[in-house]
Image (cartoon, rainbow, N blue to C red):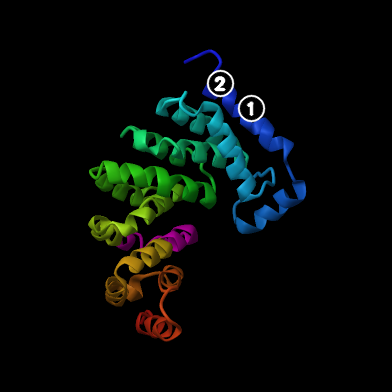
């Protein structure tokens, strides 16, 4: 790498300093209300975080390869601040056309190590990065289905939200419904909500298939998941589904 180009090890603290310089303690305290788990935040708005990620990317555009981007993302995820994690993930996403298959294992390691320790970080990382890997390497679908059995809530949530952008791809719908069904017994509300979100998005592609799926499995589906899944149906249909799928 050219000496004038910042290495990931130098770029990460530079980005954190820039984030810290814009910290808003009042907004940081307010951000906690969106999370049940404690988060550490600088208090930047989402547009400002994206702006910082864009500035970081411009410094290395055309000069870093995907290996450097992965290293940088790992360093930023290891930072306790919510916004630092987001910048790392957003920069990594710029390299998705070059993602190696090995990144799948790397991301699993990040999740299992709890450095992606909130739903927003998982939901920023996985639909784009893992979604791109699943589309490029379809044999990874079988591996990610096994994540549904993980003791780690972030790994289980990731197994669902990684398919969100793939709901537009008919070839993935069977797998989406399979992994959704496999997590009906999960008692974690963050997993239940992610499951409902995924079903809702899958239903946009073929609404009748979602309705039939809910009718077939309704009593086994957690009510939280069900309510998220039916959000796009009209009021009358939502009420009918809630009644017809009520556990006996």
Please say whether residue 191 is one of the residues in the magenta stretch: yes
Please tell me which residue lies in front, 82 or 143: 82
Residue in the image at 27% along x and 60% along y: 173
Q: Considering the numbered disc 2 on the image, is that residue within a helix, a strand or a loop?
A: loop
The CA span between labels 1 and 2 is 9 Å
Residue in the image at 46% along x and 69% along y: 224
Tell me the residue that label 2 is attached to. Answer: 6
Residue 102 sits in quarter: top left
Residue lying at the far right in this picture: please name it. 26
For the record, the magenta segment spans 180-194
Q: Are marks 1 and 2 in contact (CB under 8 Å)?
A: yes
Query: In the image, residue 247 lies at what x, y percent?
Result: 37, 79
Q: Is residue 236 above or below residue 138?
A: below
Please tell me which residue lies in front, 153 or 234: 234
Tell me the residue that label 1 is attached to. Answer: 14
Query: In the image, residue 159 lies at what x, y percent?
Result: 37, 51
Residue in the image at 47% along x and 37% along y: 113
- Left/right of residue 163 with respect to residue 21 in the rendered view: left
Query: In the image, residue 125 lies at what x, y percent?
Result: 46, 44
Q: Is residue 64 above or below residue 101?
A: above
For marks 1 and 2, the one nearer the N-term is 2
- Left/right of residue 82 with respect to residue 195 in the rendered view: right
Is any atom of residue 39 visible in this view? Answer: no
Residue in the image at 30% along x and 77% along y: 215
């Amino acid at each position: 790498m050219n000496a004038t180009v910042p290495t990931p090890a130098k770029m990460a603290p530079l980005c954190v300093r820039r984030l810290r310089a814009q910290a808003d303690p009042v907004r940081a305290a307010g951000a906690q209300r969106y999370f049940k788990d404690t988060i550490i935040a600088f208090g930047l708005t989402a547009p400002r975080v994206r702006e910082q990620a864009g500035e970081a990317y411009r410094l290395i555009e055309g000069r870093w390869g995907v290996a450097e981007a992965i290293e940088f993302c790992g360093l930023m995820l290891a930072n306790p601040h919510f916004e630092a994690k987001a910048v790392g993930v957003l920069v990594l996403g710029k390299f998705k056309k070059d993602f190696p298959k090995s990144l799948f294992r790397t991301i699993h390691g990040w999740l299992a190590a709890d450095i992606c320790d909130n739903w927003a970080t998982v939901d920023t990382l996985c639909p784009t990065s893992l979604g791109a890997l699943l589309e490029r390497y379809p044999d990874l679908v079988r591996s990610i289905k096994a994540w549904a059995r993980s003791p780690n809530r972030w790994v289980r949530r990731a197994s669902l939200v990684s398919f969100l952008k793939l709901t537009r791809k008919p070839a993935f719908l069977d797998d989406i419904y399979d992994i959704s069904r496999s997590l009906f017994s999960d008692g974690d509300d963050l997993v239940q909500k992610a499951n409902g979100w995924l079903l809702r998005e899958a239903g946009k592609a073929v609404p009748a298939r979602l309705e039939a799926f809910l009718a077939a499995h309704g009593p086994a589906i957690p009510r939280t998941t069900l309510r998220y899944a039916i959000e796009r149906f009209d009021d009358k249909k939502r009420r009918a589904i809630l009644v017809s799928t009520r556990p006996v």
